[in-house]
Image: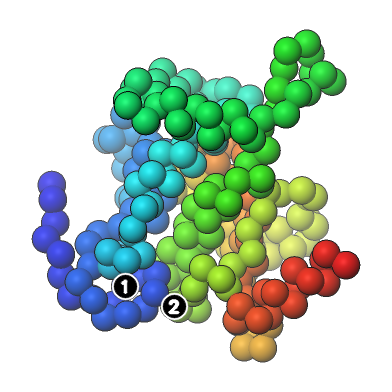
Amino acid sequence: MAHKPEWADCGLCGEHRLTTREHVVPKSLYAPTRSNSRFQRIIIAACKDCNNGSADDDAHFRFVLTLAGDTNSTVDELWSGKVRRALAEKDGRRRALDVFALMRPAPDVGPDRHRIYPADDPRVLRSVRKIIRGLSRHHRLNYPIRDDQVLADVQRLPIADDLFAAMEHRSAEPDVLEYAYLHLDDPEGLLSQWWLRFFKRTSFTGLVYASEAKRQEVVRSMAG
């Protein structure tokens, strides 16, 4: 059912504008069999500017996630349905080439095998940052959060047990997205820390900083 635009504070940029209902976790990640799920979708108000181009990013994000790890029933259903249909569209070849560019040979797991590296794609990390920003709004944490305040990456190291236990754990349908967050609210530094796992096997981490300058400071320290 379509919803008419209405005036509200955008859940991403914070501006009072005409907004529509935005799914924080892209609808494209939900297989058709989840349509009758009792899990309520996470929705915020979002303006046109913040949503501009997100549909293409969402489709690319789904394609990458279905390939980024071992398969399971949820991934199989998406791949055999939504993903295959998307690849048959007129822009399907472009989408396939975009994903192939992220693949690297993986001789350690077998001949002619490849791994995909989501962190090498700015669009994938932009999608992760947008989800974190939307979840921050949904859980009434710091708001608004700009894209340049968020540092996102694939999970490269385990999270310490005591830190992971201290985080708030939630899901947006357990076999689609499990996530956890820790609200720190340091006005001069780190506002929150995030962990997201898609399809029970592809994990990302995120840090939300008080400003772009603080995030850049951390990035520079990591680089050198």
In the rendered image, which residue does mark 1 sit on? 10
In the image, taking residue 149 as reference, residue 220 lies left or right, namely right
User: Which of these two is toward me, 39 or 69?
Assistant: 69
In the image, residue 211 lies at what x, y percent? Answer: 60, 81
* Disc 2 packing (10 Å; few <14; some 14–19; many ≥20): some
Please provide percent x and percent y for residue 151.
64, 64
Residue that appears at 32% across and 38% down: 37
- The mark tally for this picture is 2
What label sits on residue 144 in the rendered view? 2
Q: Which mark is residue 56?
A: none
Residue 143 or residue 121, whichever sits in front: 121
Residue 215, located in which quarter of the rendered image?
bottom right
Residue at 33%, 59% in the rendered image:
51
Q: Can the viewer see residue 130 in this picture? A: yes
Q: Position of residue 95 (x, y in %)?
A: 46, 32
Across and down, in percent, residue 132 comes to 51, 61
Q: Residue at x 40, y 70 (%)?
A: 12
**Mark closer to the chain start, 2 or 1:** 1
Residue at 80% of width from left, 57% of height from top?
160
- Residue farthest to the right? 224
Visible residue check, residue 43? no
Q: Secondary structure at mark 1?
A: loop
SS for callout 2: loop
Q: Are marks 2 and 1 in contact (CB under 8 Å)?
A: yes
In the image, residue 180 sits, relative to residue 156, either above or below, namely below
Type of amino acid at the residue the image marks with label 2: Pro
State which quadrant residue 200 falls in: top right
In the image, what residue type sits under mark 1? Cys
